[in-house]
Amino acid sequence: MSIGKSMGSPTGAAFALGGASNASTSGASNASSGAAAASAAGVGGARHWLVAILALVAFMLLAGCYRQQMAAQPKYDPLEPSDFFADGMSARPRVAGTVARGELVGNDFLNTGKIGAGDGDGLPFPATAAVLARGRERFDIYCSECHGRLGNGDGMIPSRGYRRPPSYHTPLLRRAATGHFFDVITNGFGAMPSYGTMIPRDDRWAIIGYIRALQLSQNATITDLSAEEQTKLTAGGTQ
Ligand code: HEC
């Protein structure tokens, strides 16, 4: 064997040693078989390693190809047009009457603002300070641009020509049930667009709670205060 013959050199011996230890782990050699045999087994082991490494490289290349194919697969991006469907849109509308998981809307007061056939009044959950703070924040974001910060209808948008909304402080809207407000926000009202898809249900109620606070703030009298608070106020507003 030509490879075995070269084993006379010190480097060859070192190689043979490495090979022998490799081979003995695989059980293909025994300790008494001499330097030449051990070196042959060593080269055989090296071949195995080479094949294994080549196989690994081939596998990685192949895996790389698959990954690229998956990344570049034919697909539509959101809102991308398509000439496949008659309406020119790639996204399909939801089948009528289907409800996505987590989107089931109950028909109770919380979800509709109705009690029986008519508008319910009050809030479906307690109007805590946190709820009112949330309502104020949402109102300022979604409503004040038209209705004004105080709800008297003088927001920026009507000042530029959009239809002016009514004040929340008219007797009519002060008497209106909260269920009516819920309906207006959810479905829109006349020139006002609907906010049902933009403002989650509980935020709609929080906004309504805050509108009630606004209504009170613009129409409160001193007799709405407790005797203690009245005394404080008339005494000059000291704490
Ligand atoms: C783009 C402007 C605009 C925004 C934003 C807007 N509204 Fe209105 N809103 C209007 C207009 C205009 C009307 C009067 C519509 C009409 O009479 O045709 C109105 C009317 C109303 C009414 C009175 C309904 C009635 O019975 O007369 C309520 C209550 C109301 N909006 C609540 C809200 C709340 C709450 C928000 C925020 C979630 C909101 N609006 C956001 C423009 C807006």
Image (cartoon, rainbow, N blue to C red):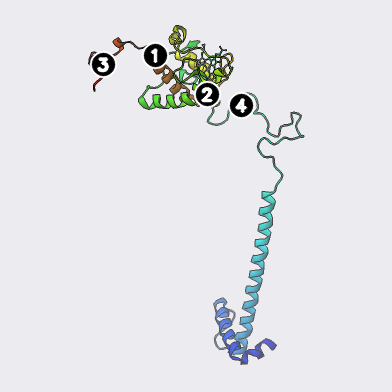
Q: Which residue is mark 4?
A: 98
Q: Residues within 10 Å of mark 4 (few under 14, many from 20)?
A: few
Question: Residue at point 38% right, 27% down?
Answer: 130
Q: Quadrant of the N terminus?
A: bottom right
Which of label 2 and label 3 is nearer to you? Answer: 3
Q: Position of residue 118 (x, y in %)?
A: 49, 10
Circle 2 Cα neighbour tier, 10 Å, few/some/many (<14 / 14–19 / ≥20)? few
Label 2 vs label 1, nearer the camera: 1
- Secondary structure of residue under mark 4: loop
Please indicate whether residue 170 sits to the left or right of residue 42 in the image. left
**Amino acid under disc 4:** Thr
Q: Residue furthest bottom?
A: 8
Pointer 1 residue Cβ closer than 8 Å to ligand 1: no
Which of pointers 2 and 1 lies earlier in the amino acid sequence? 2
Q: Are marks 4 and 2 in contact (CB under 8 Å)?
A: no
Mark 1 Cα shell of 10 Å, populated few (<14), some (14-19), many (≥20): few
Position of 208 compared to 194: left or right? left
Query: Which quarter of the image is occupied by the C terminus?
Result: top left
Q: Earlier in the sequence, mark 2 or mark 3?
A: 2
Q: Which residue is mark 3?
A: 233
Camera-nearest residue between 65 and 31: 65
Return the residue at label 1: 218
